[in-house]
């Protein structure tokens, strides 16, 4: 028998998923990390990318997330994201459009957070390779 834990994925628009899972692969800010049962408590930022989890079947569920935070406490994992789209519903064009929006903001003369936007662009380009 495998150890499962609670996962909630909540976007600005709705609750995307709630249920028991065996593992979660998270696109963390300094690299992907795996969450298993009895993970140490933590809070981390999430970069744009694909969040994957398994409910115990061989099939993994996959969501493109635009960034957010994850909290892990006592086998309860909460993922709060700006937006989440099921992996089979995200098109490469959607990610390409997000990259174009970042490029537009980077080229604006009054943009003050160009370093942050540059990192976001890199994250989106990496997600595009995985789409």
Image (cartoon, helix red, strand yellow):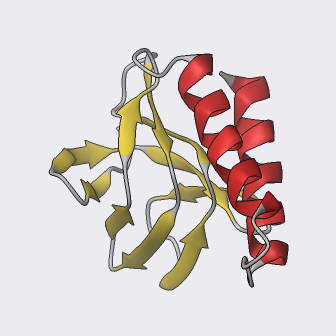
**Front position in the image: 108 or 38:** 108
Q: Quadrant of residue 93?
A: top right
Q: Position of residue 95 (x, y in %)?
A: 61, 32
**Front position in the image: 66 or 56:** 66
Horizontal arrangement in the rendering, residue 62 relative to residue 20 (left or right)? right
Residue drawn at (72%, 29%) of the image: 128
Residue drawn at (18%, 53%) of the image: 13
On-image quarter of the N terminus:
top left
Q: Position of residue 34 (x, y in %)?
A: 62, 54
Q: Residue furthest front?
A: 109
**Front position in the image: 115 or 28:** 115
Number of marks drawn: 0
Residue drawn at (43%, 15%) of the image: 88
Residue drawn at (63%, 47%) of the image: 101
Horizontal arrangement in the rendering, residue 109 relative to residue 36 (left or right)? right
> Is 128 rendered above or below residue 12?
above
> Is 98 rendered above or below residue 26?
above
**Front position in the image: 18 or 119:** 119
Q: Quadrant of residue 50?
A: top right
């Amino acid at each position: 028998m495998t150890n499962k834990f609670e996962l909630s994925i909540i976007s600005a628009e709705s609750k995307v998923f709630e249920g028991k899972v065996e593992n979660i692969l998270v696109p963390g800010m300094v690299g992907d990390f795996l969450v298993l049962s009895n993970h140490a408590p933590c809070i981390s930022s999430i970069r744009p990318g694909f969040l994957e989890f398994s409910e115990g079947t061989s099939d993994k569920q996959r969501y493109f997330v635009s960034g957010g935070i994850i909290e892990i406490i006592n086998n309860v994992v909460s993922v709060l994201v700006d937006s989440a789209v099921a992996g089979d519903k995200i098109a490469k064009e959607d990610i390409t459009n997000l990259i174009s929006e970042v490029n537009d903001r980077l080229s604006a003369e009054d943009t003050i957070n160009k370093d942050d936007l540059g990192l976001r662009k890199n994250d989106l380009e990496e997600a595009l390779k995985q789409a």
